[in-house]
Image: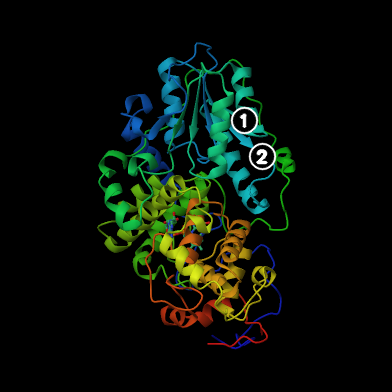
Amino acid sequence: MSKPGSAKGTSNKAPAAKKLKLETSDDEPCSSRTPSVDSGFLASVESKRKLCAENILEFKFNKKRCRLLSKSMELGNFGGGVLYWMSREQRVQDNWALLYAQRLALKMKLPLHVCFCLVPTFLGATIRQFGFMLKGLEEVEAECQKLQIQFHLLKGDSQTCVPNLIKKLKLDAVVADFSPLRVPLSWIDKVKESIPEDVPFCQVDAHNIVPVWVASDKQEIGARTIRKKIHDKLDEFLTDFPPVVTHPHPHQTKAKPVDWKAANAYLEVDRTVEEVDWITPGTKSGLLELSNFCQRRLRLFGEKRNDPNVAALSNLSPWLHFGQLSAQRCILEVKEYKAKYAKSVDVYIEETLIRRELSDNFCFYNPNYDNLKGAANWAQETLDVHKKDKRPALLTSQQLEEGKTHDDLWNASQIQLTRTGKMHGFLRMYWAKKILEWTETPEEALRIAIYLNDRYSLDGRDPSGYVGCMWSICGIHDMGWKQRDVFGKIRYMNYKGCQRKFDVVAFVQRFGAKAYPIKGVKYE
Ligand SMILES: Cc1cc2nc3c(=O)[nH]c(=O)nc-3n(C[C@H](O)[C@H](O)[C@H](O)COP(=O)(O)OP(=O)(O)OC[C@H]3O[C@@H](n4cnc5c(N)ncnc54)[C@H](O)[C@@H]3O)c2cc1C
């Protein structure tokens, strides 16, 4: 580890959460502000949908994607239409939940509605995440209007808003999407209790390629146990998508156009963590970034994804998190490069399919997905045995948040997170493990890691985030390693290991980071 203040070109300033264009490596553009790759890609995706089927009625929809939440699926006879209550999947096309809702509406010759319930606060999300989400939803509204689907932005909690809308519009059925996380699951439960019995209610997993309840009926030990289960089902689930089409049965009254400024003003969120401008929200931009990735960075993904100085990553997680982009679409597109970049394609599929769906599996089957009780017994035991070990440094959450530790690489990673809203995937592991090393207890470490990740990262509050923090700090989906202080048998990472993998000085300089002297702390 370098001595305090040793990185060249450093500044004494703490990392402010201000706008910064994401740094790019010299040889590859990283992520575009307005993706520059041809919009021919959008047309090609559109024609693939049309080739797949004319519409969802002409497609053999796999009902295993759907679970019935009400007693019966018999549609009411009210005539107001079918409602897709959009929550996790904030896109129109490539969305099995909306496709299923349109299927029901087409079958019954009913209008089709989409609603989104906007709450003023959500688990500490700041304007950085809410701003990204609202801009994506604005695109959803415009797309719905074109397709004669009524889009309703409802202000308030779903428990009140969804039943009110059902009543007001005399709706016949409700389709929800799926998230394994506690709060959205509780929303589903509450809506289930408060909608009329004669309005059928079902849920579609439109996030996972293999629906979480089909992939496995239990919490999996790790990638090695879920991999085959998922791969064995790909023939059935990794299909193309038919298009959501112009809806032929309009509702008599049109949904009121959304006042997006008022929606923004309605939020009661922290606005000091500003929005970032290196990434453009919305499905269109997400698809163009996917095309950018395939054409420019995929070739490097297999070999260079652990080097934070190289633009090799997809950078798609913010769009995936908000459901503005479908992971299934990403995999379908990336697979087309198999002959050209076999290793990169395999690795991308392993990450986006297996690792991502393993995260949903963990959160779905383990109610303690974000606390130490969720860890395996061996991990809880080993952390407990080492709870009283002397830490090489004891840092406050403020020192961590401001990136003022004795480790310039850690500080640079924290600056990348606070300024850009996205820390490189390899550094996320190092970053979280060091929090374990420098705080009083594993519980405290986990709390701080989740807090910082969720506060600054565009893709925060995601199953992959909880699992990422739990993997780093309490060994979930991992095995026991050589025993050492503080970590016990939890896998360890250190600065020297990073130096062996990539040019640490270059990364530190890129973010103007430095190490801060901490009294009594020895440097490696
Ligand atoms: C401490 C820590 C915190 C994390 N927090 C988040 C988070 O808040 N939100 C989030 O989406 N991911 C999180 N991850 C997982 C992973 O680091 C990110 O998904 C990845 O960095 C996103 O960048 P990318 O899209 O450029 O990924 P790429 O490297 O291009 O990977 C492609 C895709 O594979 C998936 N993926 C990659 N790595 C993982 C992984 N370890 N677990 C699950 N899926 C993965 C993602 O969907 C990603 O978009 C975290 C990991 C750690 C160790």
Q: Mark 1 vs ligand 1: CB under 8 Å?
A: no
Determine if the C-beta at disc 2 is less than 8 A from ligand 1: no
**Residue 470, position in %: x, y?**
49, 60
Give the residue pinned by disc 1.
159
510 relative to 234, above or below: below
x%, y% of residue 199? Answer: 51, 19
The answer to which quarter of the image holds residue 74 is top left
Identify the secondary structure beneath mark 1.
helix
Q: Reading the chain from its start, which is encountered first: label 1 or label 2?
A: 2
If the image is split into quadrants, where does the N terminus sit? bottom right
Q: Nearer the viewer, mark 1 or mark 2?
A: 1
- Residue 463 visible in the snapshot: yes
User: Can you name the residue that lies furthest to the top here?
Assistant: 77
What's under tag 1, amino acid-wise?
A: Gln
Residue placed at 53% from the left, 40% from the top?
A: 90
Q: Secondary structure at mark 2?
A: loop
Query: Looking at the picture, how far across and down is residue 409, in whole percent?
Result: 55, 77
> Image quarter for residue 167?
top right
Q: Position of residue 413 (x, y in %)?
A: 56, 71
Q: Which residue is mark 2?
A: 119
Q: Nearer the viewer, residue 36 or 134?
A: 134
Q: Amino acid at mark 2?
A: Val
